[in-house]
Image (cartoon, rainbow, N blue to C red):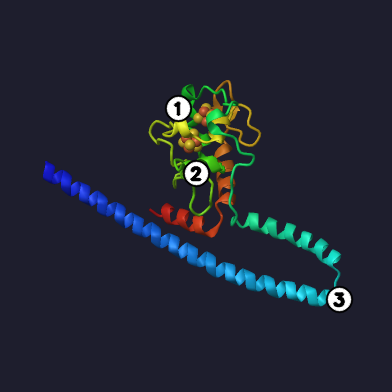
Amino acid sequence: MKWNKGIMQKENQNGTQELMKDIAKGLLYNHARINANTVKTLEATSFLYALVELLNEKGLISIDELDERKKQVAERLVKVFIESGIGLLYQDPEEDKYTFKQEANVDCLSRLHICKSICCKFPFALSKQDVEEGIIRWEFGRPYLIAHNPDGYCSHLDGKTYKCTVRDHRPVPCRGFNCQDNEKWHVWLDYNKKILNPELKEQIGQGNDKIYSCPATKFKREANDEK
Ligand code: SF4
Ligand code: SF4
């Protein structure tokens, strides 16, 4: 037995070392990319500033005009940036989940056999607290939206009991979601009679398609769907 334990410890150590090596490689790559991009950004910025100075000196543009146009273009680009799914998403404003006071008062346990925790299919952004804590998984292709399985459910949901496996650490939107009167997600056709809204699945599908349409995640989901 001792002999087996020794082998297992060694295997665990080797596994950890391999993992550390992989992480170090990934970090090295990222730092190299950031350095290369910073150099390119500095170069492009220098050209741009030089051009603006020259055009201004020659009386072809005024700085006020340029500032106004810059504002318009920036607004346009921010919109494209958000729509393309390149940016980071965080809860804003952020609240401490462990002192969050507005927990929803829903009798989930008596409804689970009907709703099958359909609210755990909704996409939402994590808070910095969730991400730094490192317990709640997020979509690598779309930081920092909560991670979903190929079946559309949050990866922390127990697929048999429909209960949350990280209940004590669940994010604020999970704590605060009230399916009785939510403005965006109409879970129930009749809350009191416990009749589900038949159009909800379609609404979730459309919402998720829009959110998960950035190429990296789309590829991952399509690949998983084929299994
Ligand atoms: S909040 Fe509503 S939809 Fe979500 S698990 Fe509870 S009863 Fe079901
Ligand atoms: S963290 Fe828990 S409550 Fe929140 S979506 Fe995931 S399974 Fe549902």
Query: Spatial distance from mark 1 to mark 3, Cα to Cα?
Result: 70 Å
Query: Is residue 144 something that shows in the picture?
Result: yes
Q: Secondary structure at mark 2?
A: helix
- Sequence-first tag of 3 and 2: 3
Q: Looking at the image, which residue is at 48% across and 28% down?
A: 114
Viewer-side residue, 106 vs 138: 138
Viewer-side residue, 12 vs 87: 12
Q: Secondary structure at mark 1?
A: helix
- Sequence-first tag of 1 and 2: 1
The three-letter amino acid code for the residue at tag 2 is Glu
Name the residue beneath numbered marker 1.
113
Q: Secondary structure at mark 3?
A: loop
The three-letter amino acid code for the residue at tag 1 is His
Picture quadrant where residue 66 is located: bottom right
Query: Spatial distance from mark 1 to mark 2, Cα to Cα?
Result: 34 Å
Q: Looking at the image, which residue is at 40% across and 36% down?
A: 159
Name the residue beneath numbered marker 2.
132
Badge 1: few (under 14), some or many (20 or more) residues near its Cα, within 10 Å?
few
Above or below — where is 63 with respect to 190? below
Picture quadrant where residue 102 is located: top right
Q: Nearer the viewer, mark 1 or mark 3?
A: 3
